[in-house]
Amino acid sequence: MGRIAVPGADGLPRSADVVVIGGGIIGTATASFASRAGFDVVVLERRDGLGTLTTAASLECFRAQFDEAENISMMQESIAVFEDFASFVGVPDCCINLHQQGYLFLTAEDSGADAMSRRVEHQRCHGLTDVVLLDGPQTRHNFPFVGPNVVAATYRERDGWLSAHELTQGFAQGSSALFCLRTAASGIRLDAQGVAAVETARGVVSTRCVVVAAGPYSKAALSWVGLDVPLRLLRRQRVVLTNLPEVPPDAPMTIDQDTGAHWRPAAGGAALGWALPEEPGEPMETVPAEWTFSSVALEGVSRLVPFWAQVGDSLARDSVLLSAGQYTCTPDHKPVIGPCGSVPGLYANTGYSGHRIMASAGGARRLADLIADPSADPENPFRSERFLQQGWSACAESLVL
């Protein structure tokens, strides 16, 4: 059973097989899989609780409908863990509030329909055989809330959402790791062999293996040893609208593929999001949301789902709950998982570009395998070296989500 505590005067271990920097969903999942592999793991979390920064701001959704074979495989692996999570972590009463109501992608463009057809064919070739391609009439028959301008859709029933808090706590409780709260890492010590220790205000933990899984603070942590990985932080806002009988409680996560506006049932109403253009920013402990985002998001989701226009006309202020977090993004929107550069013993598990919840289990398992054997996957598609190989840099690469 994982131990979650604020270390006392003598509470910080002097050494560990693996030290994980960051106690969000990726850090706790990493600790879970590393401890299952037999490693003595310590997690350092700067805040008062696990999963209280970007994890808490998530829309908490998961899907296997991706374009890349490596992402399809990783998400399928994660979803299989979610479906049997209590057994997986060995905590019988652990409930992550799994809702497999599907992901529905909609388009009103003929070009979008063509792209959907090609994508579904590609997905099926890579093992995602349960994705359904629908034309406009079929979409409206299956999902009556969809508007008349929709010409095509894709749907996968096993996609959905869950409780990110319960998932994070479950990974922690089901591990043998020590989770040290209010314990910010402040440096990584190196010697002739590579990684030697992690520094904190509470003391130093000696180790030959450090995993940077610090979300928005990952770039800074990697810079302690002179590494410049092209990670950018983008604000992402969400709004939860409560007490809305217009929202079908059995609806799937519904996405306007043409614009990116999306929503899902939540709290007797719905949670809405939209990845609007943002300038990259610096890490923030508290990410501000804009009050106007609720009306902007409503306008976005109403384009293909007409009932949202009526909701906006009668919305009460006290039923609007706004929040925001930061995506840690890479240029190709895929995470960095594995050994880092020329520093023996340093690993990264970060840069999920908004997909950290849904990829948490699959990404952590891959990372744990690479800790056990850094040469286990020589074709690792998530290796940090891919940026150098493709000539990317943190300064020159433009990011389009």
Image: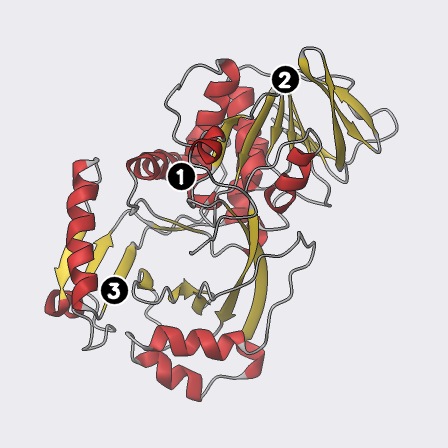
Q: Identify which amino acid the numbered label 1 is placed on.
A: Phe
Which element is circle 1 on? helix
Residue at the spot of label 2: 40
Tell me: residue 83, above or below residue 377. below
Q: Earlier in the sequence, mark 1 or mark 3?
A: 1
Q: Position of residue 128 (x, y in %)?
A: 22, 40
Residue holding disc 1: 82
Name the outermost residue toward the bottom. 313
Q: Which residue is mark 3?
A: 106
Residue at the spot 56% in from the left edge and 25% down from the top edge: 341
Per the model, the C-alpha gap separating discs 1 and 3 is: 26 Å
Q: Amino acid at mark 3?
A: Leu
| Of labels 1 and 2, the one closer to you | 2
Is 144 positioned to the left or the right of 228 in the image?
Answer: left
Mark 1 or 2, nearer chain start:
2
Residue type marked 2: Asp
- Left-right relation of 64 to 24: left
- Are discs 2 and 3 less than 8 Å apart at CB? no
Instruction: Give the label, 2 or 3, closer to the camera.
Output: 3
Q: Is residue 149 above or below residue 222?
A: below
Q: Position of residue 379 (x, y in %)?
A: 36, 23
Callout 2 secondary element: loop
Label 2: few (<14), some (14–19) or many (≥20) C-alpha neighbours in 10 Å: some
| Number of residue marks | 3
Q: Is residue 92 visible in this depiction of the protein?
A: no
Q: Position of residue 37 (x, y in %)?
A: 51, 17
